[in-house]
Image: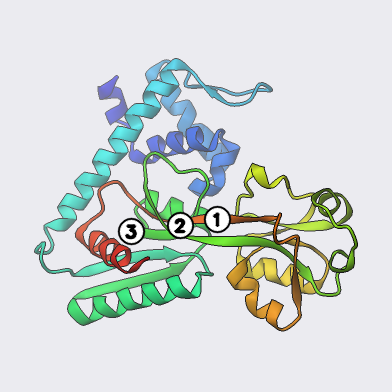
Amino acid sequence: MLHTLIKHDLKALQAFVAIVECQGVSAAQDRLNMSQSAISTHLAHLEESLGVSLCRRGRAGFSLTKAGYQLYEACTLLLQATGEFHRKVQNIKWHQSVLSGTLRIGVVEHLPPDFQATVCSVISDAYQHYPELRLSMDIRSPQEIETAVATNHLDLGIASYHVLLKNLHYHLVFESRQNIYCRADHPAAKAENLTLNRLEEDYVWVKCSYAHTPAHIGISGGVTTAVAHHVDAAVLFLLAGSHIGFLPEDAARAFVAQGLLVPLLPQQATYLLPNYTVTRPTPDPRVNWFLGQLSSRLP
């Protein structure tokens, strides 16, 4: 089995890992940025080469066979070992005590002011103490950041996640409070005897794909006619007065102060959204330095 697997490139194995963790071929398309037919080809090639069925797909849903589960476990170990090998080779390029090269960082488009200030202070120190170090910063969605870190297109990400993948490392760095908001002249803002049930049944929602509402809140999102993949996009729907939806409290604060937005049932419909740094299991010295500096400055 081993000599057969060695013939496959890492893309096929990465595709299989994505299929398993996304629970299906179609669900893995966004993570891999690959067509469904290409992903299916990778899966069929693996099954044909190994002579076994790796997963079951049908009305009953997606599930792994025994062989599929064994391959997934082996793939996880292989990808981790490959990543570690790559980073050890990269370490040859610089002395461990001197940071150089480029550290690639991905962040979401909205960070709380306090955390943003902390990141800025780390960036300042990086350029002050390590003149040969370069930082590359990109703004992406949480899923895009996670995929880029997993595929070695980013070294470090900062975003919110509710499902933590076993082939990546996550460290909680802050929590952002999420409340439901609407425009000040929206019918929900003036409704009497407002309840969670009425919020779901009487009004249309903008679904925020970047945030997962915990089950204990008792809200599934009601009738959703809009989707926002970024905080700023959700703000547009709320300011339009057409929808209600969740926003980070600090992102809504300025609009509330201006009288443009109002919170709905802030004592009941509120929760803390965890935000993490995400890295590969054995990050290089630049990532270790950045994480260490970040952790030492957080409360």
Task: State the image coordinates of residue 19 (x, y, percent, origin top left).
Answer: 50, 35
- Please indicate whether residue 15 sits to the left or right of residue 231 in the image: left
Q: Compare marks 1 and 2 and give the one earlier in the sequence.
A: 2
Distance in Å between CA atoms under marks 1 and 2 = 17 Å
Q: Amino acid at mark 2?
A: Ile
Q: Tell me the number on the disc at residue 296.
A: none
> In what element is the residue under mark 2?
helix
Task: State the image coordinates of residue 53 (x, y, percent, origin top left).
Answer: 48, 18
Q: Which residue is mark 3?
A: 155
Q: Compare marks 3 and 2 and give the one earlier in the sequence.
A: 2
Q: Tell me the number on the disc at residue 273.
A: 1
Query: Which residue appears at 32% of the width and 49% of the height?
Result: 280
Quick one: 162 or 23, which is closer to the camera? 162
Quick one: 153 or 117, which is closer to the camera? 117
- Please indicate whether residue 35 sits to the left or right of residue 170 in the image: right
Q: Which residue is mark 2?
A: 145
Q: Colour mode?
A: rainbow
